[in-house]
Amino acid sequence: MFDSKDLYLCAIYMPPDNNVFYRKYDLDVFEVLQEQIEHYSVLGNIAVIGDLNGRIGLENDFIMQDNLNVFNCNETDLLNYEPDLPSKRTTEDIKPANSFGRKILNLCKSSGIRVCNGRFGKKSETFTFQNKNGCSIIDYLLLSCDSFSIVNDFVIGDFTTFSCHAPLKVVFKLKGLTLNEICTCKTVKYDCYKWNEGFKDDVKRDLAANSDKVNELMNSLSDEPRNIDEIVNNINSCLSDIVNKYTKTEVTKVLKCDYCNSSKRTYKPIHTRQDKPWINDDCKQLYIEYRRSLKQFNQNKCEENRLILNLAKQRFKRTENSLKRRYKKQRGNMLSSMRKNKSKVLLSKIQETKKGHTKQH
Ligand SMILES: [Zn+2]
């Protein structure tokens, strides 16, 4: 990191509190996390990022009025103790904290880490989860309270069709890599030569007009063999001057700087996706509506748009699943009837399917 410390990054998924995991394994995952944070915070910066499945609302993740009672502390405690500093946080999720949310807040208070959501501007305070029941913030970036300066940018991205969770995007400042905040693009000019068949006669005429000059130079070769280099150069430039007149153009090109390359990069899909064999036109239309309502929700995360989105998603998923089931059943029936009658055709069908599968992945 740019502050010369190492960064210990923990990517985490915390199963929700009613999950079977907690009945199977009798342990408090937050306690384990706290132990790990204590262990690694001696070595460097700590960042925890992921789905913590708890809502914290607007409650503080630091200790309020954290003043020391000097009469209750011994001298060494006093030297090591750093009181919490109040730090403002904003949020779109204003519901009060739930049980896991309280555990997150207690973890912050006891390990000196802070919630980054809502502390890096408007784009960091938005909902991270949505489904048919509602919206919430349950995905976080937590960071040691004295290492906020290592974060260049932290935002909650748009919701996608891949998940009910929005992506968390964080940019850390690395040592020796200072990001240029200004554009240093360069314009370069160079010559480009391109033959144009249309100028053929002009070139011929010019060459003929200069033939005396070239002949003269050729003759001087035998007269003054010592000056061979100079004479050859003269012949060369005489010929190229004529041809360049018709073939040379100056090209201007912009060499993009790192700043422009990273901030304006557009991601293009590497390959065009092929529709799955069971997708039909109705299903495609439902998918288009699903994408449209997703876009609308990302622009305005109101209740109405969330309901529209989840209905559109449900309609698409239901249709796709039933088409998929029907397709697989038909394939199954076809293969089993082939097994009885035409074993060779069956083998080639199976190989075909295998090839199709490897292509898709
Ligand atoms: Zn630039």
Image: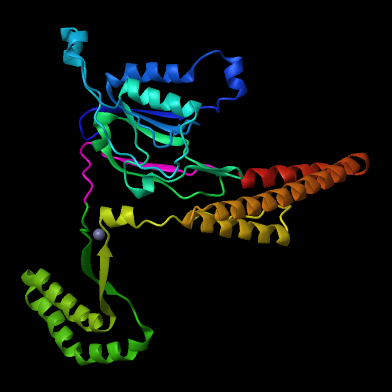
Q: Position of residue 162 (x, y in %)?
A: 56, 45
Quadrant of the drawing holding the C terminus: top right
Depth order, front residue of 6/226: 6
Q: How many marks?
A: 0
Residue 203 seen anywhere in this rendered image of the structure: yes
Which secondary structure type mostly characterizes the magenta part of the structure? loop
282 w.r.t. 339: above or below = below
Name the residue rendered at 48%, 56% in the picture.
300
Q: Quadrant of residue 17?
A: top right
Q: How is the image coloured?
A: rainbow
| Magenta stretch contains residue 166 | yes
Residue 174 seen anywhere in this rendered image of the structure: no
Q: Which residues are magenta?
A: 163-180
Q: Position of residue 47 (x, y in %)?
A: 35, 30
Q: Position of residue 100 (x, y in %)?
A: 48, 26
Quadrant of the drawing holding the N terminus: top left
36 w.r.t. 74: above or below = below
| Magenta stretch contains residue 20 | no
Q: For the view shown, which residue lies furthest in the top direction?
A: 74
Q: Position of residue 15 (x, y in %)?
A: 54, 27
Q: Quadrant of residue 279?
A: bottom right
Q: Quadrant of residue 156?
A: top left
Please tell me in which quarter of the rendered image ligand 1 is found: bottom left
146 w.r.t. 272: above or below = above
Name the residue rendered at 74%, 43% in the picture.
351
- Horizontally, residue 241 falls left or right of residue 280, namely left
